[in-house]
């Protein structure tokens, strides 16, 4: 098949996705439902690049969602264009698979939240370390629009501050230090232990490479894992990650 045929078909599918007006179902409820079945929820992230470099460019979003969608509880989609090569177009494509969708950007404004709502996502990411005192105004704005906030932290102090302010929000525990970008599952485990029993939904983010990592996080109290790089490199890993039991 020649290049124009391939790109023509991808363009046709992209245009069709842009026309759709699908709204994603609740991420929170989907995670709770998966947990009630006895399993750790899997949030599969479409992530073409990161600050560390290109992850994978030869995997189109349809091929990715077709495979991981069989096993994922929900999707996370990067929209940041410079370091992550993301796009709102990928969000529109993800919405057509009937799963909850997280709008993942470095949100600093209501305009970005408006975009997330306009696209049809169920959830939007807020990074506490980035937003500081501006966090809660933006979180409240998102909630008023009907979106479910996922507040991301990378330290015990920030995690405790979030759960003491609003334990009902989804709390993302990042294994990655957002300052120097180092990754450590031990960091995530330490944070989870500090707030275990105080947060309703804990989502472990970054650094999950295999089932053993997922099992460790599930044992410590994570309700869900958000996996990007490992799934982009091996979409079939979704089957194994979706079978991790919560005890």
Image (cartoon, grey):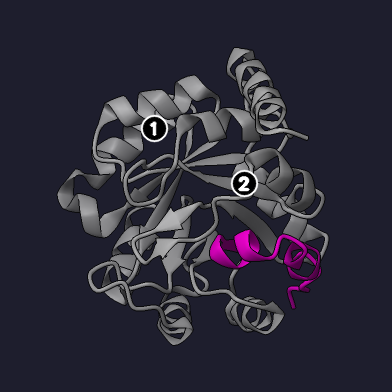
- Disc 2 packing (10 Å; few <14; some 14–19; many ≥20): many
- Residue corresponding to mark 2: 75
**Quadrant (top left/top right/bottom left/bottom right) for the C terminus:** bottom right
For the point 77% across and 66% down, which residue is it? Answer: 39
Percent position of residue 3, x then y: 66, 33
In the rendered image, residue 113, in percent from the top left (x then y), is placed at 36, 30
Figure quadrant of residue 38:
bottom right
Left or right relative to 85: residue 132: left
Q: Residue furthest front?
A: 2
Measured as percent of width and height from the top left, residue 14 is found at: 62, 24
* Residue on which disc 1 sits: 142
- Picture layout, residue 141 above or below residue 12: below
Residue visible at 74% across and 52% down?
68
Residue 167 visible in this rendered orientation of the protein: no
Tell me the element at label 2. strand
Taking depth in this image into account, of 223 and 179 the one nearest to the observer is 179
From mark 2 to mark 1, how far is it between C-alphas?
19 Å
Residue 180: image quadrant is bottom left
Magenta stretch bounds: 224-247
Quarter containing the N terminus: top right
| Number of numbered callouts drawn | 2
In depth, the one of 204 and 81 nearer the eye is: 81
Disc on the earlier residue, 2 or 1:
2
- From the image, state whether disc 2 or disc 1 is nearer to you: 2
Q: Residue at x 59, y 78 (%)?
A: 217
Instruction: Give left or right: position of 18 versus 175.
Output: right
| In front of the other: 13 or 119 | 13
């Amino acid at each position: 098949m020649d290049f124009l045929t391939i790109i023509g078909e991808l363009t046709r599918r992209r245009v069709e996705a842009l026309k759709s007006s699908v709204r994603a179902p609740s991420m929170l409820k989907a995670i709770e439902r998966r947990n009630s079945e006895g399993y750790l929820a899997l949030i599969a992230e479409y992530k073409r690049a990161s600050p560390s470099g290109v992850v994978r460019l030869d995997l189109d979003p349809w091929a990715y969602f077709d495979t991981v969608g069989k096993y994922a509880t929900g999707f996370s989609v990067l929209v940041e264009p410079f370091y992550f090569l993301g796009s709102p177009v990928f969000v529109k494509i993800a919405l057509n698979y009937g799963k909850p969708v997280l709008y993942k950007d470095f949100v600093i404004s209501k305009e970005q939240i408006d975009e997330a709502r306009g696209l049809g996502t169920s959830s939007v990411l807020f990074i506490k370390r980035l937003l500081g005192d501006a966090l809660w105004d933006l979180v409240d704005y998102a909630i008023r629009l009907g979106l479910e906030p996922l507040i991301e932290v990378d330290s015990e102090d920030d995690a405790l501050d979030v759960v003491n302010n609003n334990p009902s929000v989804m709390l993302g525990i990042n294994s990655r230090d957002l300052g120097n970008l180092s990754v450590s599952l031990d960091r995530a485990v330490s944070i989870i232990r500090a707030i275990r029993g105080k947060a309703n939904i804990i989502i472990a983010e970054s650094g999950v490479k295999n089932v053993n990592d997922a099992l460790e996080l599930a044992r410590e109290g994570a309700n869900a894992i958000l996996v990007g790089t490992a799934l982009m490199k091996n979409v079939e890993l979704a089957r194994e990650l979706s079978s991790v039991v919560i005890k």
